[in-house]
Image (tube, grey):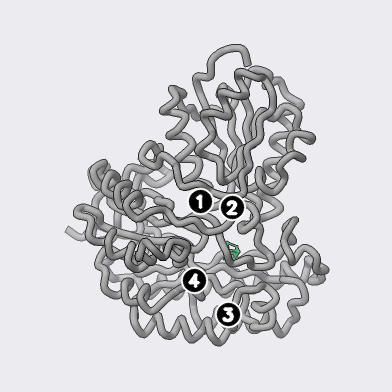
Amino acid sequence: MDRPLKTFFIRTYGCQMNELDTEIMAGQLIKKGLSPIQDEDSADLLIFNTCSIRDLAERKVMGKLGLIGRGSKKNVVIGLTGCMAMAKKNNLFQKFPHLDFVIGTNNITDLGHVIDEVLSTRRQVMKTDELFEENLDYLATRRESKVKAHVSIIRGCDKFCTYCVVPYTRGSEVSRPPESILEECRSLVDQGYKEVTLLGQNVNSYGKDQPEWNCRFHDLLARLDAIQGLERIRFLTSHPVDITIELMQALRDLPKLCQFVHFPLQAGSSRILKKMHRIYTAEEYFEKVDQLRSIVPNVSLGTDIIVGFPTETDEDFEATYEAMKKIRFSLAFIFAYSARKGTPAQRWKDDVPEPVKEARLQRLLELQDQISSDEQHQMLGKTYEVLVERFNKDGRMLKGRTRCWKKVILEGPSQLIGTLQQVHIHSFSHQTLLGKVVQ
Ligand code: SF4
């Protein structure tokens, strides 16, 4: 690259944590004088913010980088960030000699320096620290939405589920100081934001690594709930073991906290849960759901499920099916197991045949479709508070969400964007409710 960088494009793969990291990196680049553009092919700087959770996500990035290598992007700086950077490290430079830099999940604060180094030395640069240092410039974050914002509160994970790469790609849990989170949320409210979603691989662990702060997750929620002008607080994601009574009480008592909890079950068989190192049994999980529902009767639950984990028998699978039937989640992300490099589960034989995994997956998807459709039927004719977020993809109707995270499409002028409306639900189509503002 023999001219100054003026424009950038970041392609993001994977979870909300990655989307937020992209927004944080975009903020740093704008501060450095670059402008974001929508056309990936014209950007001076191209970054792939990658994900290693599933094999497919990795293959997509490898394919894309391979194509670029064969193309004519000689005058472009190309970088790779995110989980693949941590999982593959030096192999990336060997495989893709046209890659200019690789930055791990714990080094996004170094983005500016790394780009300067690439430009001045014309060498490939890699930064992949194992530990995260809490020194990001959150206030510069450049967000797409003007209504709702993701806010990072803890990075990393200490749970080590046997199928998951996150503890290896994102490192140990590091909580962000409460004052820094409060400062960012107050600044968001000043800019007109109405909703924040607190993000972390396991937000319920918040503060455990910093006992001297005396601020656990429910304490942080109470402090955020007191911010004038903030309308809604959500959080993602939770580990069932860390969902405490205090958190359940916060869900009942804090008016801004939305009553939706992502409560990943993963499997309904205690034998499989043990093999996954989920550190709870199916019975303990059910007890916790009962306890939560008795304290917060209107709570909605979401979950993640893996089918076809090594050694999963028909009986184990039926336990998962029955668990989903019994709990009736509002939302479920269901996946067929695929081994991830570097995880303990990768050492075990992936012994459930693909057609069996696929059949199990389809059965659960059909069950969940039925449960969601029943739930939507029950919402018909009722009125719900909706935060109007933006125009829907068609550009005519508006899109928003209820407190329990149901998507609602409604008619109305653009002035409704960023406001809370009472919306009467009159019909639904697949996962979307259709409604009308109640005057
Ligand atoms: S709790 Fe388990 S599945 Fe979730 S990020 Fe940590 S190791 Fe991965």
Residue at (66% x, 51% y) in the render = 52
Residue 157, quarter of picture: bottom right
Mark 2 or 1 closer to N-term? 1
CA gap between label 2 and label 3 equals 23 Å
Residue for badge 2: 170
Residue 74, quarter of picture: top right
Closer to viewer: mark 2 or mark 3: 2
As shown in the figure, which amino acid type bears the numbered disc 3?
A: Tyr
Residue for badge 4: 263
In what quadrant of the picture does the C terminus appear? bottom left
Query: In the image, which disc is placed on residue 280?
Result: 3
The reply to whether the C-beta atoms of the residues labelled 4 and 1 are less than 8 Å apart is no
Tell which residue pokes out farthest to the left in this image: 439
Distance from mark 2 CB to nearest ligand 1 atom below 8 Å: yes
Q: Which of 218 and 415 is in front in this view?
A: 218
Mark 3 or 1 closer to N-term? 1
Residue for badge 1: 17
Q: Residue 149's x, y, as percent?
A: 37, 48
Closer to viewer: mark 2 or mark 4: 2
CA gap between label 3 and label 4 equals 13 Å
Residue at (51% x, 84% y) in the render = 286
Drawn side of residue 189 relative to residue 49, left or right: left
Disc 2 crowd, CA 10 A, few/some/many (<14, 14-19, 20+): many
Tell which residue pokes out farthest to the top in this image: 2
Mark 3 or 4 closer to N-term? 4
SS state under label 2: loop
CA gap between label 2 and label 4 equals 21 Å
